[in-house]
């Protein structure tokens, strides 16, 4: 089938020039505790979340605003088109336009094997990805299959402009015990293949306990979060944009004029900090990484890189990269940052939102940005009731969009939020039940979400 994504060949031929950023002049704004509007209630005008039955199964699994609907696409153990059971621990997910259909590539955050597919990178590893095709009219599956296997703890990732999914291994595991090969790498999975594809690690992107990896389509630079506390925020500047198998530079974010800047506490929202990047000299040292998960981060810190706390999901939208830090902030309840890319020479870091009240939000994980770019959908991985949240970029107000009511799994984290290419459907997963949902509403109500 033909797809509308830019091909890798065409992307490379764009010949984008990429390089390190130089910072703006910096004026010290002081250290001020984040004080952003907190709400944590339902979306104004939408009424309370109400227990809602699935359109296709009749089960009451979610609470949604009145008038919202959902289908259960697939769940743990369901037999897929390739005859295999849908694996456990569905996590980060990306959506692609597949000749008018929706292609989803879904991570599975699993550890030891057996492998879920036939062409594993490591036969002793049980993680990987599945690929699913959804009819946008019925919002039901038309096919599903294992698309990569033999990985460890595939958490988040990111879509590329050339039609692949970057899946990240959140681990330091190496060849010992059940495992045969080094893990902790980023892998590339083609979104439009019809069967499982053997995968090899993108070694040049480095080892930094990766959680999410998103591509700036203008430059081909890959921005990477790291799920450690402390951690850095990284990027890979490829020598050949669009070809991540080739060499390039791994760099860590730094705040211009403030070496060793710590974003974890006493931050002020809506202040833009000038960003520069420091080179990582030894980004793919497997032995050193196995011994110390912070090996790459420590190199960047020694050069003045900035510290974050547990980088999680990330998303590119309108010349910015948005990313979550799940336990950053004075209250340890999570932060949402925006990295303004602007151009290769001017970049800025802005704290969009910091939770100061567990009733508003706790532990943001996977995130996505609505098609308009005006709203963020945030997957919660906290304790107690778990919600999908809607964060308005204007006014920094956060609201509850959906509540997990899955029997026996009400404490399960949300994951994998992403919109269909036409913007009419929101896909999201519950990791504990390993279930995928398609959520929608009528055009008028949906317009304020997208």
Image: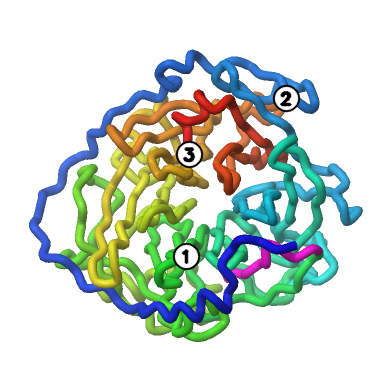
Pointer 1 residue: 215
**Residue shown at 62%/40% (left/top)?**
427
35 on left or right of 66? left
Which label's residue is closer to the chain start, 2 or 1? 2
69 w.r.t. 319: above or below:
above
Residue 81 percent coordinates (x, y): 87, 52
In this rendered view, identify the residue nearer to me: 91 or 191: 191
Residue at x-position 73% and y-position 71%: 179
Q: Closer to the N terminus: mark 2 or mark 3?
A: 2
Residue 192 shown in magenta: yes
Question: Mark 2 and 3 residues: CB-CB less than 8 Å, in contact?
Answer: no
Which residue corresponds to mark 2? 54
Q: Specify the farthest residue to the right.
A: 83
Residue 107 visible here: no
Number of residues whose C-alpha sits closer than 10 Å to that of mark 2, classed few (under 14), some (14–19) or many (20 or more): some
* Marks 2/1: CA–CA distance: 34 Å
Q: Position of residue 182 (x, y in %)?
A: 64, 75
Q: Quadrant of residue 448?
A: top left
How crowded pointer 3 is (Cα within 10 Å; few <14, some 14-19, many 20+) is rated as many
Q: Which element carries disc 2, helix, strand or loop?
A: loop
State left or right for residue 112 relative to residue 328: right
Question: Can residue 15 be seen?
Answer: yes
Q: Is residue 120 magenta?
A: no
């Amino acid at each position: 089938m033909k797809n509308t994504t830019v091909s890798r060949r065409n992307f490379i031929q764009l010949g984008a020039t990429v390089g390190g950023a130089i910072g703006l002049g910096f004026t010290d704004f002081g250290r001020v505790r984040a004080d952003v509007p907190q709400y944590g209630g339902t979306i104004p005008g939408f009424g309370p979340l109400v227990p809602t039955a699935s359109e296709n199964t009749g089960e009451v699994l979610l609470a949604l605003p009145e008038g919202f609907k959902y289908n259960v696409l697939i769940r743990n153990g369901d037999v897929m088109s390739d005859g295999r059971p849908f694996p456990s621990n569905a996590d980060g997910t990306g959506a692609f336009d597949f000749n008018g259909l929706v292609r989803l590539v879904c991570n599975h955050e699993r550890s030891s094997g057996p492998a879920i597919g036939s062409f594993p990178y490591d036969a002793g590893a049980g993680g990987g990805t599945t690929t699913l095709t959804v009819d946008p009219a019925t919002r039901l599956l038309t096919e599903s299959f294992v698309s990569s296997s033999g990985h460890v703890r595939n958490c988040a990732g990111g879509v590329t402009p050339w039609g692949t999914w970057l899946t990240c291994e959140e681990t330091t595991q190496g060849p010992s015990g059940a495992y045969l090969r080094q893990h902790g790498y980023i892998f590339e999975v083609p979104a439009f293949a019809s069967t499982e594809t053997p995968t090899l690690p993108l070694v040049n992107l480095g080892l930094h306990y990766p959680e999410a990896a998103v591509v700036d389509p203008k430059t081909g630079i890959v921005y990477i979060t790291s799920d450690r506390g402390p951690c850095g925020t990284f990027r890979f500047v490829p020598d050949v944009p669009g070809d991540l198998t080739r060499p390039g530079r791994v760099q860590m974010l730094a705040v211009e004029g403030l070496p060793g800047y710590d974003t974890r506490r006493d931050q002020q929202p809506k202040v833009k900090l000038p960003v520069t990047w420091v080179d990582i000299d030894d980004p793919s040292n497997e032995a050193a990484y196995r011994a110390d998960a912070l090996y790459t981060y420590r190199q960047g810190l020694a050069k003045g890189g900035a510290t974050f706390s547990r980088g999680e999901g990330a998303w590119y939208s309108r010349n910015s990269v948005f990313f979550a830090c799940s336990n950053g902030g004075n209250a340890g309840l999570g932060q949402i940052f925006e990295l303004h890319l602007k151009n290769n020479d001017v970049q800025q870091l802005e704290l969009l939102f910091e939770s100061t009240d567990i009733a508003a939000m706790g532990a943001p994980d996977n995130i996505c940005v609505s098609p308009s770019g005006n709203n963020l959908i945030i997957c919660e991985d906290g304790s107690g009731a778990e919600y999908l949240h809607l964060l308005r970029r204007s006014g920094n107000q956060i609201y509850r969009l959906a509540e997990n009511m899955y029997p026996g799994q009400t404490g399960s984290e949300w994951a994998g939020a992403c919109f269909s290419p036409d913007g009419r459907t929101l896909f999201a997963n519950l990791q504990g039940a390993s279930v995928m949902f398609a959520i929608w509403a009528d055009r008028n109500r949906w317009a304020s979400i997208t």
